[in-house]
Image: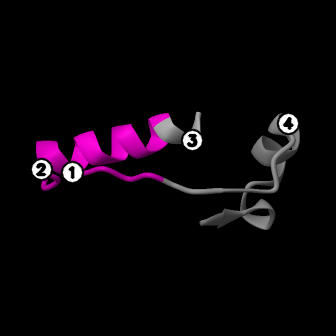
């Protein structure tokens, strides 16, 4: 999780207090990426 103190300008411009950072990498499987996409889709 990223806190507002670490991104004051960006967070202030967007009016958010915190966020969850997603950092996929080459060693993630397609199934893992699909699971994250589905989970994010449920949030939106």
The residue mark sitting in front, 3 or 4, is 3
- Depth check: give the residue in front, 27 or 38: 38
Quarter holding residue 3? bottom right
Q: Which residue lies at the image location 50% right of the left edge and 39% below the top edge?
A: 42
Q: Range of the magenta residues?
A: 22-41
Query: Residue 28: percent from the left, percent from the top?
Result: 17, 53
Residue at image location 47% in from the left, 34% down from the top: 41
Q: Residue at x 74, y 55 (%)?
A: 7
Query: Please, which residue is most extreme toward the front here?
Result: 42
Q: CA distance from mark 3 to mark 4?
A: 22 Å
Question: Which numbered disc covers residue 13?
Answer: 4
Residue beneath label 1, please?
32
Read off the residue under disc 2.
29
Give whichever of discs 1 and 3 has the lower sequence position: 1
Please identify, in this view, whether the residue under mark 4 or under mark 2 is nearer the observer: 2
**Residue neighbourhood size for the residue with mark 1, other residues' Cα within 10 Å, grouped as few (<14), some (14–19), many (≥20):** few
Location of the N terminus by quadrant is bottom right
On residue 1, which mark appears?
Answer: none
From the image, tell me which residue sits under label 3.
43
Q: Residues within 10 Å of mark 3 (few under 14, many from 20)?
A: few
Task: State the SS at label 4.
Answer: helix
Horizontal side of 31 relative to 3 (left or right) equals left
Is residue 20 within the magenta segment? no
The color scheme shown is one colour
């Amino acid at each position: 999780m990223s806190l507002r103190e670490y991104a004051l300008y960006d967070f202030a411009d967007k009016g958010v207090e915190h966020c969850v950072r997603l950092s996929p990498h080459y060693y993630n499987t397609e199934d893992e990426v699909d699971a994250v996409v589905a989970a994010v889709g449920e949030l939106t």
